[in-house]
Amino acid sequence: MSELYRLVNSQGGKATAIVGMTKNVGKTVTLNSLVKDYEKSDIAIGLVSAGYDGERFDRLTLKEKPRIYAPRGAYVATARACFDAADADLELIEVSPFSTPLGQVCLARVKRAGLVELAGPGSVSSLKSLIEKMLSFGAEHVLVDGAINRLASASPLVTDATILASGASLGPTMVDVIKKTVFRRALFITSPLQDEVMLKAARKGLEEGNAVLLHREGNAFRVEPVTGMIPLLAGAQMIDMCNEETAALVFGGALVDNTLQDVMDLYEKPPVVIVNDPTRLFITPEIYYRFLNKGGQISVLEKLNLMAVTLNPTDPCGRGYDPQMFLDKMADAIRPCPVFDLVYQEEKGF
Amino acid sequence: MELDLTKVKTYGDTLNDGAMQVSFTLPVPAGDEAKEGARQIALKMGLEAPAVTEMADLGAGFTFFVLYGKCTHTVDYTAIKIPKQQQKVLSFKEVNALIKNRLERKVVVVAACTGSDAHTVGIDAIINMKGYKGEYGLERYPEIDAYNLGSQVPNAELLARAVELNADAVLVSQVVTQKNIHLENLTELIELAEAEGLRDRVLMICGGPRISHELAIELGYDAGFGAGTLPNQVASYIAADLVRREKNGK
């Protein structure tokens, strides 16, 4: 059993997301390693992809990819065409209402172990519903494989914990790869809002608008909800309504560079910026660190549980790093977050 | 001789002769040594009795070859399983009739080349009234209101416009290169749509020379269309999926 498996299994959640910094960083390798250990422990798992996994060759690079092995007794959710073409023996339980170009997503139980291709639904709400279905059928834990650099499946609304895959293909140098990973982790571990009164006010405001201003009023807050066609536009609108008493800005959707820049231009010491969860942060390192340096604080309503980072020291299109050195440097940079190179560590026998 | 589908061989003159033609270039000057080099490569590729039938000097020390040989490999055709796209393609008239009869309202489609991409050939072929290869573009469909926002549209702006126009479908055109430069622009749009709570409200469709249905699923889109796609294929998909969604009550 790998250390990573022990981590996932001990934290008690029902669903774990495996998301990647980019393509070819080893999301599926991480998934397969966990699947193997779950099979050994005789725990029924559910498998679903936020994208398309398990095909023989990469759609873009045409290089061979790791395939997905579904153990007996596992549950899978995959598009009709992949269900029909599976090498594993699958028993259909239910056809979900979610459609893909390869047909409706089917929920099935694995009768004979084998390879499967997982083609998942387009939206995160569908993913969430498929996870719940598999749990209700008897899966004890669901693993959600990510796609490319998409992170939405890591949202605490969908999964209980997240494993972030990173690797050599992320950037031209090891320093760059580490820098980008450190930044993503910093966003992922954005701390939840501690101030109970503010938290309550923020939640209340979001029931009425898709962005909210919280103005200080004695010991409490005056809640001013703003409604725009989409939260992004409401957020932009909110900037014009800020005053000296504004203690917090709550964004019901995405937080983008422009908005954060506007907030910085407005204040010497900016108000607290609040988003639902870390997957709503669409900001670049430059703006983020400038905001923090100005004394800014970003908080989330729902915390994301980043359990570990896994590494792939080789880039299928070129360079590779010494696995031990890469592992050590990354571990140093993101301590205390556990870091694994599952392939290398298995070879070395730990 | 019977055709054995579990051991299919390449075909030349007679069944199972394994005959095959290959062509390639070697970075050496034309000559007897180059010819022998080409033959040895073919042998290593699994071709029996390879013969060089054409050798052309490309200049600057390069030589082009055509060879014939007998391929020794077979494939088990019966064991091949390929997941296939399930969408039926309708004609211009059928799409309009489907929208008119089943949806009883016009369908709004918003299209753009997003991010840094300025390659509008693809999106124009699908949207422009005159269409492509004899198939009218979506602008010509009486039951579709199509808006072409042009090129280099930022993702956030595209989403805002889509909501403003009450779009049923968003069409994004991108030239995805081997180095994945535009890939992350496509995923960012999807992630933004998720964060903004729009993902379930709008059909998200991508298109471009390297995009396939499978890649679209990977990118998080509802559908993807590659090179050579005709406007009615896109329109069929949009109409059929909206009808299906309406039926499912979402």
Image (cartoon, grey):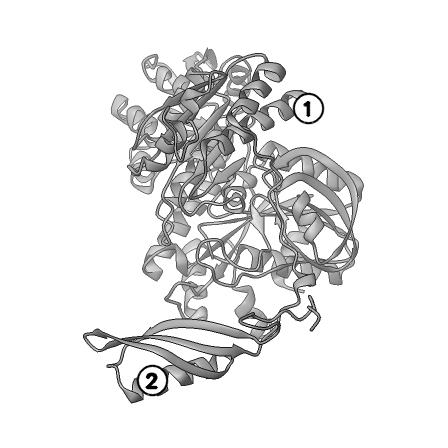
How many neighbours does mark 2 have within 10 angstroms: few (below 14), some (14-19), or many (20 or more)? many
Badge 2 element: helix
Q: Residue furthest left?
A: B60
Is A47 in front, or is A113?
A113
Answer with left or right where residue B51 lies relative to residue A139: left
Answer with left or right where residue B56 lies relative to residue A117: left
Which labelled disc corresponds to residue B35?
A: 2
Is A262 in front, or is B54?
B54
The Cα atoms of the two marked residues, 1 and 2, are separated by 65 Å
Amino acid bearing label 2: Lys
Q: In the rendered view of the protein, which quadrant contains the N terminus of chain A?
A: bottom right
- Vertical position of residue B207 compared to residue A225: above or below: below
Q: Where residue B41 sits: x, y (%)? A: 41, 81
Q: Where residue B106 sits: x, y (%)? A: 51, 14
At 56% from the left and 40% from the top, the residue drawn is A153
Residue A25 visible from this viewpoint: yes
Q: How many marks?
A: 2
Tell which subunit mark 2 falls on.
B
Amino acid bearing label 1: Asn
Q: Earlier in the sequence, mark 1 or mark 2?
A: 2
Residue wearing tag 1: B248
Is B137 in front, or is A29?
B137
Q: Quadrant of residue A216?
A: top left
- Vertical position of residue B167 compared to residue A316: above or below: above
At 57% from the left and 61% from the top, the residue drawn is A66
Q: Where residue A32 sits: x, y (%)? A: 63, 59
Q: Where residue A344 sits: x, y (%)? A: 53, 70
Residue A232 visible from this viewpoint: no
